[in-house]
């Protein structure tokens, strides 16, 4: 009976988040204003071409169209791309938080995974010594990026379980270690020059010029994470450990293995986000992902993950990341000073935690 009530509560929470997303989108559409954008058309070979017209004097000028600042295809695609990096990591963070843990090192894992993969990509890139093996190098770079993320996550979980130290302390330390290693490897310099096949794959665009690969990856990660949490026995064990670790241990669940697994998932999602970033931006530095841990944790918490453990969903993490990104984009669209962005996001996190605590108190009283 309790599981049925819990699932109903989660569905209601996700529906509430969807309403918030729609309301924010409607407000930005109504009050964001409009802007002139260059007009493009699809050429005979499927490429995008700018449209030109002639003025009264016969001069050739670029055609423009006035569009809504928020509700236009380019902005929505950009919003999806920006959201995808945080949302993918937020799904992994939700696994960690459901298990009653925390991971402050996701931004540093993102940076280290990107830096190591970038060095491999550069070796097989147009300017690298192994340019002739670009295809094999692209696959090797992908494996290094994802593998580094998983290994860093396993290191976080392994130290937390073996040393019996709270993951807040462990991941606070590894956050500095991972970013320090990335800085030592690059000396603070940017690494680029990747195989063109890898970049063109990530930046593949539709005939209309929209980049949808990050969006597709975000949806796939959210669906896979949601199915794992709700449809598999290991997923149910994560909820059990976060809800009551002592009871889970006495019932035969290997809590240490569960914790190790959720940190590995968190590292993997950081590696996936780093891989998409490499393909999209074409370079990596040790400063990448600096401060991402705030946005990732914020997305998970706003999405309904309880910091006390035992509750959260992958879909909620995706919607939470979208809300955070809508707030950031809205500040730009409305012309508000961007220095207020972090202040607003921090306030939203506090509000989400207060609402969670209030909901738990009301649920306890109803019992």
Image: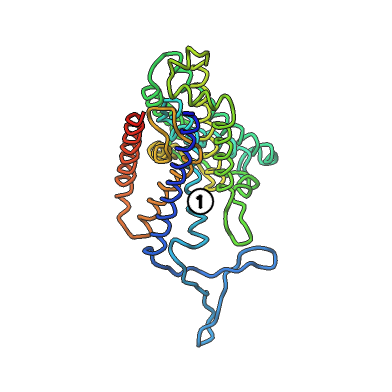
Residue depicted at x 42% and y 48%: 323
- Left or right? Give the position of 338 relative to 129: left
| Helix, strand or loop status at disc 1 | helix
- Left or right? Give the position of 106 relative to 351: right
- Left or right? Give the position of 289 relative to 357: right
Task: Tell me where residue 117 sits by quadrant.
Answer: top right
- Vertical placement of residue 285 versus 28, above or below: above
Residue 292 screen position, x and y as percent: 41, 39
Q: Check the image and name the residue furthest to the bottom.
A: 57
> Is residue 287 visible to us here?
no
Residue depicted at x 47% and y 47%: 83
Residue depicted at x 29% and y 50%: 340
- Vertical placement of residue 59 versus 127, above or below: below
Task: Tell me where residue 363 sits by quadrant.
Answer: top left
Residue depicted at x 63% and y 61%: 207
Residue 248 screen position, x and y as percent: 48, 17
Picture quarter with the C terminus: top left
Residue 212 screen position, x and y as percent: 58, 52
Residue on which disc 1 sits: 80
- Vertical placement of residue 173 versus 313, above or below: above
- Vertical placement of residue 135 versus 210, above or below: above
């Amino acid at each position: 009976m309790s599981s049925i009530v819990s699932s109903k509560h989660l569905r209601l929470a996700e529906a509430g988040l969807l309403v918030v997303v729609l309301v924010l989108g409607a407000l930005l559409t109504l009050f964001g204003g409009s802007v002139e954008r260059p007009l493009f058309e699809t050429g005979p070979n499927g490429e995008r071409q700018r449209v030109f017209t002639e003025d009264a004097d016969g001069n050739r000028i670029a055609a423009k169209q006035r569009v809504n600042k928020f509700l236009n295809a380019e902005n929505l695609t950009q919003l999806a791309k920006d959201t995808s990096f945080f949302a993918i990591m937020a799904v992994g963070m939700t696994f960690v938080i459901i298990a009653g843990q925390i991971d402050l090192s996701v931004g540093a894992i993102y940076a280290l995974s990107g830096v190591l993969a970038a060095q491999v990509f550069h070796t097989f890139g147009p300017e690298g010594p192994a340019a002739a093996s670009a295809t094999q190098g692209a696959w090797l770079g992908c494996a290094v990026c994802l593998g580094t993320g998983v290994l860093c996550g396993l290191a976080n979980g392994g130290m937390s379980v073996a040393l019996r130290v709270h993951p807040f302390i462990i991941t606070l330390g590894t956050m500095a270690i991972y970013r320090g290693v990335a800085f030592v490897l690059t000396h603070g310099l940017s690494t680029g020059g990747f195989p063109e096949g890898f970049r063109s794959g990530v930046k593949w665009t539709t005939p209309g010029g929209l980049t949808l690969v990050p969006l597709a990856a975000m949806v796939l990660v959210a669906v896979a994470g949601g199915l794992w949490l709700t449809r598999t026995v290991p997923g149910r064990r994560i909820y059990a450990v976060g809800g009551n670790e002592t009871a889970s241990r006495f019932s035969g669940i290997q809590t240490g293995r569960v914790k190790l697994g959720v940190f590995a998932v968190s590292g993997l999602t950081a590696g996936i986000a780093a891989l998409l970033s490499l393909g999209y931006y074409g370079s990596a530095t040790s400063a990448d992902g600096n401060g991402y841990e705030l946005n990732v944790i914020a997305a998970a918490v706003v999405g309904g993950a309880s910091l006390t453990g035992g509750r959260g969903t992958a879909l909620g993490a995706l919607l939470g990341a979208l809300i955070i990104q809508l707030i950031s984009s809205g500040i730009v669209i409305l012309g508000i000073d961007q220095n207020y962005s972090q202040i607003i996001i921090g306030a939203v996190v506090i509000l989400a935690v207060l609402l969670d605590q209030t909901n738990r108190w009301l649920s306890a009283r109803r019992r």
